[in-house]
């Protein structure tokens, strides 16, 4: 079971499966590294919503 912050609503949108997997390239070894690469590769698209999503799962 995933631990997620109570009352959280995922507002991140607009990412394709290809964009998500594209961020999982060599050199990404942590969840935080994945978040950084995902945002960098996609022009910081939905930056606040993505950061909120990672925070909701306690990966801040």
Image (spheres, rainbow, N blue to C red):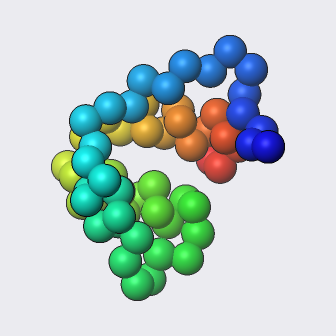
The mark total stands at: 0
Which x, y percent locates residue 54?
Answer: 57, 43
In the rendering, at what x and y percent does residue 33 appear? 49, 66
The percent position of residue 21, horizontal first and vertical second, equals 35, 64
Quadrant containing the N terminus in the rendered view: top right
**54 left or right, relative to 35:** right
40 lies above or below 52? below
Indicate whether 33 appears above or below 50.
below
The residue shown at (42%, 24%) is 11
**In the picture provided, is 19 more to the left or to the right than 10?**
left
Please report the residue visible at 22 percent of the width from the left and 52 percent of the height from the top: 42
Task: Tell me if 50 is positioned left or right of 54 in this view.
Answer: left
* Residue, far left: 43
Q: Quadrant of residue 26?
A: bottom left
**Is residue 16 among the parts visible in the rendering?**
yes
Left or right: where does residue 59 sit relative to residue 41?
right
Q: Position of residue 57 (x, y in %)?
A: 67, 41
- Residue 48 visible in the snapshot: no
Q: Is residue 59 above or below residue 10?
A: below
Residue at 25% of width from left, 36% of height from top? 14
State the residue at coordinates (62%, 21%). Answer: 8
Instruction: Please determine whether, in this image, residue 6 is positioned above or below residue 21.
Output: above
* Residue occupying the far top of the picture: 7
């Amino acid at each position: 079971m995933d631990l997620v912050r109570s009352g959280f609503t995922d507002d991140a949108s607009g990412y394709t499966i290809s964009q998500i997997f594209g961020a999982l390239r060599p050199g990404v070894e942590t969840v935080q590294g994945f978040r950084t690469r995902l945002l960098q590769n996609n022009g910081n698209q939905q930056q606040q919503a993505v950061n909120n999503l990672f925070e909701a799962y306690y990966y801040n």
